[in-house]
Image: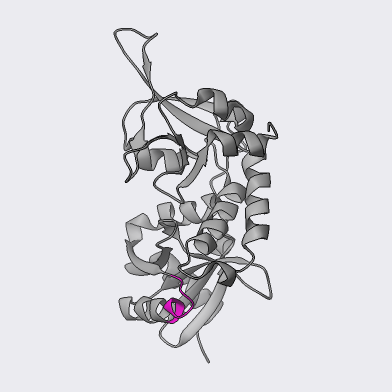
Amino acid sequence: MGISKEEAIKELQNRETVFVAYSQATKLPYVKCDEETYNDQAWIFSTEEGIKEFGKKMLEEKVLLMGMKFTKKDYPRLYGTFYAIGVNTVVWVDGEDKIEIDLTDIAKQADMSKIEPAKRPLLNPTLELSGIYFMQELRRPVEKDQHGNLRELEEELIVNLKKSEYLVAMNVDPEDPKKINIPYLKNKKEEILQPVFTDVMELEKFTKGQKLRIAKVPFAKLPELLIDKAMAYAVNPLGFNLVLNREQLNKIIGLK
């Protein structure tokens, strides 16, 4: 008989723990585009064994996953993350049973319409989703000619990068408000990267409650905000971590 939709929804809302498939390439939930429905699916499992089995199967396609355990109190944040990254369905796997459920049936999205536009927290689900698909494929450890539709994925990502807004974090000296420090990161080669974020959830992963001043800027403004000592921006450094240098930024904007 399998599991009914009602039972699956109940489990996804009330079960004590679940295991979510995360992508090692993006440090975000693994998202799969269903070949028939084109739904953007996240995968949730009732047991650790279930997710390990799925991980093994995906490994044959050189897709590297990790299982993340969530408890009931974390579900609102988890489903909020799904909305933020553009997921629209969840595949619930419980033993032999598997069923796809619309995300809207499991959790409602926070209603931002009551908040005036200027104060709404920035979310960029379309950009997050295109970044996830591109990075999941780009970082799949296969020969160059074995990559799937990388070109299309890149083109879609570029379109979305161009039309989105971003959050840039600044550290303002309380003694001297004119003194502004821009937080930066170093990569393994000790090169300096400046973080920039597509949405509030990615920003919060980085600031971890630190009080920083945040500016919301369009893509075209990013080149002038890149600090001199930075080699490039790291877009969502704790997420899909897309590195864009000055040349790439200008090329996307259309300045040769």
Q: Quadrant of the C terminus?
A: top right
Q: Is residue 100 above or below residue 219?
A: below
Residue drawn at (38%, 16%) of the image: 180
Q: Is residue 49 above or below residue 171?
A: below
Residue 238 location, x and y as percent? Answer: 39, 47
- With 53 as the anchor, is 34 left or right in this view? right
Magenta span contains residue 59: yes
Residue drawn at (56%, 74%) of the image: 100
- With 11 as the anchor, is 222 left or right in this view? right
Residue 216 location, x and y as percent? Answer: 54, 28
Q: Quadrant of residue 178?
A: top left
Residue 196 location, x and y as percent? Answer: 47, 35
Viewer-closest of 27 and 193: 193
Viewer-closest of 178 and 100: 178
Q: Quadrant of residue 45?
A: bottom left
Residue drawn at (62%, 33%) of the image: 250
Q: Which residues are magenta?
A: 57-63
Kindly tell me whether residue 116 is visible in this rendering.
no
Viewer-closest of 147 and 241: 147
- With 160 as the anchor, is 22 left or right in this view? left
Q: Quadrant of residue 160?
A: top right
Residue drawn at (44%, 34%) of the image: 231
Q: Is residue 8 above or below residue 135?
A: below
* Count of marks placed on residues: 0
Kindly tell me whether residue 128 is visible in this rendering.
yes
Viewer-closest of 236 and 200: 236
**Which residue sits furthest left?**
175
Residue 169 location, x and y as percent? Answer: 42, 28
Magenta span contains residue 139: no
Q: Is residue 175 above or below residue 2?
A: above
**Which residue sits furthest bottom?**
1
Colouring scheme, one of rainbow, by chain, secondary structure, one colour: one colour
